Image (cartoon, rainbow, N blue to C red):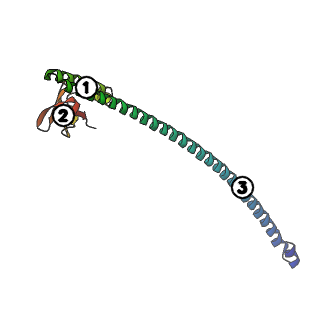
Amino acid sequence: MTIARQLGLPEKVITDAEVNSMKADDSTGELINQLQAAKAIAEENKQITEQTRAEAQRLEQEHRAKLDELVRRETSMSEKLRKEVFTELRSIKGEIERLEQAQPSQRILLDSLHRISQYITDRLREAPEEQQRLGFIQQLKMGDKVHVRSLNRTGTLNEIDPKTQKAVVQLGPMQMTISLDDIEDVS
């Protein structure tokens, strides 16, 4: 402004320039304050993001560890079950071989095979999948849609005989008597 006065500019022009200069300084200061506030918020958001990322990584590691443990336990259980099945099969094979060598009458052989079959059936009923299937069979009622595995067809349940473990299923125009073991849920 000193140079403007030395050049002889009118005082009104110089005064207006000084007022405008102060306003510009005020708005510049306000802009700087806003930028500093925005920078502080951005820093805070960055810290929150980093904390969230760290928490997400921690949770992912925890879940992976839990999943790995579950897989290990499932593998261990499967291995244990596999060993039990092989032990049972070896036992059955030994029983059959013993029966073959002894050359018993046919009736004794059939009785032994029936006991073996019953034993296998009992062991299978203890399996979780079989428990689930038995629950399904117990909930069956007339008119339910069922899938017949051996025929790969879906039909309507017309009758159930729990004594014989058989069911009558309408498959299109035909009615068939099916073992309950051959029936499963449509889904």
Indicate the amino acid at tag 2. Answer: Thr
Dot 1: element: helix
Camera-nearest label, 1 or 2: 1
Q: Earlier in the sequence, mark 3 or mark 2?
A: 3
Task: Kindly identify the residue that appears in the image at 64 percent across and 51 percent down.
Answer: 46
Q: State which quadrant residue 73 falls in.
A: top left
Do tag 3 and tag 2 residues touch (Cβ < 8 Å)?
Answer: no
Dot 3: element: helix
Q: Label 2: which residue?
A: 156
Question: Is 48 above or below relative to 7?
Answer: above
| In-front residue for pair 118/137 | 118
Q: Label 1: which residue?
A: 95
Q: CA distance from mark 3 to mark 1?
A: 87 Å
Name the mark on residue 36.
Answer: 3
| In-front residue for pair 185/181 | 181
Q: Earlier in the sequence, mark 1 or mark 2?
A: 1
Q: Quadrant of the N terminus?
A: bottom right
The answer to whether residue 139 is seen in the rendering is no
On the image, the x and y values in percent for residue 109 come to 17, 23
Task: Kindly identify the residue that appears in the image at 43 percent across and 34 percent down.
Answer: 76
Dot 2: element: strand
The answer to whether residue 24 is seen in the rendering is yes
Q: State which quadrant residue 156 falls in.
A: top left
Indicate the amino acid at tag 1. Answer: Glu
Q: Earlier in the sequence, mark 3 or mark 1?
A: 3
Indicate left or right for 53 with 12 as reference: left
Indicate the amino acid at tag 3. Answer: Gln
Q: CA distance from mark 3 to mark 2?
A: 74 Å
Do tag 1 and tag 2 residues touch (Cβ < 8 Å)?
Answer: no
